[in-house]
Image (cartoon, rainbow, N blue to C red):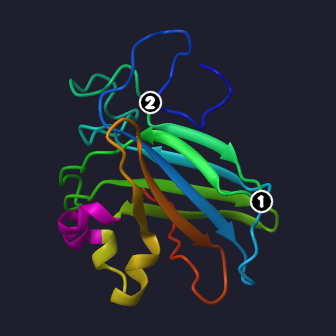
Amino acid sequence: VDGDRSDLTRLHHGLSVEPQGKPIILRGRLLDSEGEPVDDALLEFWQANAAGILRGPDMPDHPQLDPYFDGYGRLISTLEPFVFKTIKPGAIAAGKGMGARAPHITLTIFSDGITRLVTQVFFDDESEANARDPLLESLPAELRGRLVARLTSAPSDGPAIYEIAIVMRGAGETPFFDDLSS
């Protein structure tokens, strides 16, 4: 596996195979309390595949695992918006005491002065699933939109582009959570 983990649509460079699902680009900005860009933060992404299956030690042989998609990405932010290319995750079925989950990507941020911040990014074109997601439902209504990436482009010949701003502290702060299992 190549060291560049910002494009999950090409897990094995040089192979002509691709993961199952619809390619997307998640474009985002990390902002401080003054609304200024934060650079040099390490961003880790973890998500289900297009079938809604999370790759993990408890599912090594799940029949719906995609051999060309591992669901884990990593990049270092700069002053420019970060760009993460992946496939749109599927909804995760209810289980292990948790209700069904809307399609989302878990984002962990490591930066100077913080141990880690964990949040989740949802998609605005999944409003029905978002309305039933237990994590979103647990938040006050006025905070839910801070976790939802907006669809800004959906070309027929390329990946859809979603955009989000992650505010690390202060007014408009993004909701952050303890470590999440999904």
Quadrant of the image occupied by residue 168: bottom right
| Cα separation between marks 2 and 1 | 28 Å
How many marks can you see? 2
Between disc 2 and disc 1, whose residue precedes?
Answer: 2
Residue situated in front as seen by the camera: 132 or 113: 132
Residue situated in front as seen by the camera: 103 or 182: 103
Element type at marker 2? Answer: loop
Which residue is under mark 2? 70
Assess whether residue 147 is covered by the magenta stretch.
no
Image position of 139 with respect to 135: above or below? below
Which residue is under mark 1? 79
On the rendered structure, is 42 left or right of 23? right
User: Which x, y percent locates residue 110?
Assistant: 70, 57
User: Which x, y percent locates residue 155?
Assistant: 36, 45
Identified by mark 1, the residue type is Leu
The structure residue drawn at horizontal position 32% and vertical position 79%, both measured from the top left corner, is 138
User: Which x, y percent locates residue 142?
Assistant: 39, 89
On the rendered structure, is 120 left or right of 63? right
Identified by mark 2, the residue type is Asp
Quadrant of the image occupied by residue 174: bottom right
Tell me the crowding category of disc 1: few under 14, some 14 to 19, or many 20 or more residues within 10 angstroms, Cα based.
Answer: few
The structure residue drawn at horizontal position 19% and vertical position 70%, both measured from the top left corner, is 132
Which stretch did the figure color magenta? Answer: 124-134
Image position of 17 with respect to 9: above or below? above
Residues under numbered marks 2 and 1 in contact, where contact means CB atoms less than 8 Å apart: no
Tell me the crowding category of disc 2: few under 14, some 14 to 19, or many 20 or more residues within 10 angstroms, Cα based.
Answer: some
User: Which x, y percent locates residue 48?
Assistant: 35, 42
Secondary structure mostly taken by the magenta-highlighted segment of the chain: helix
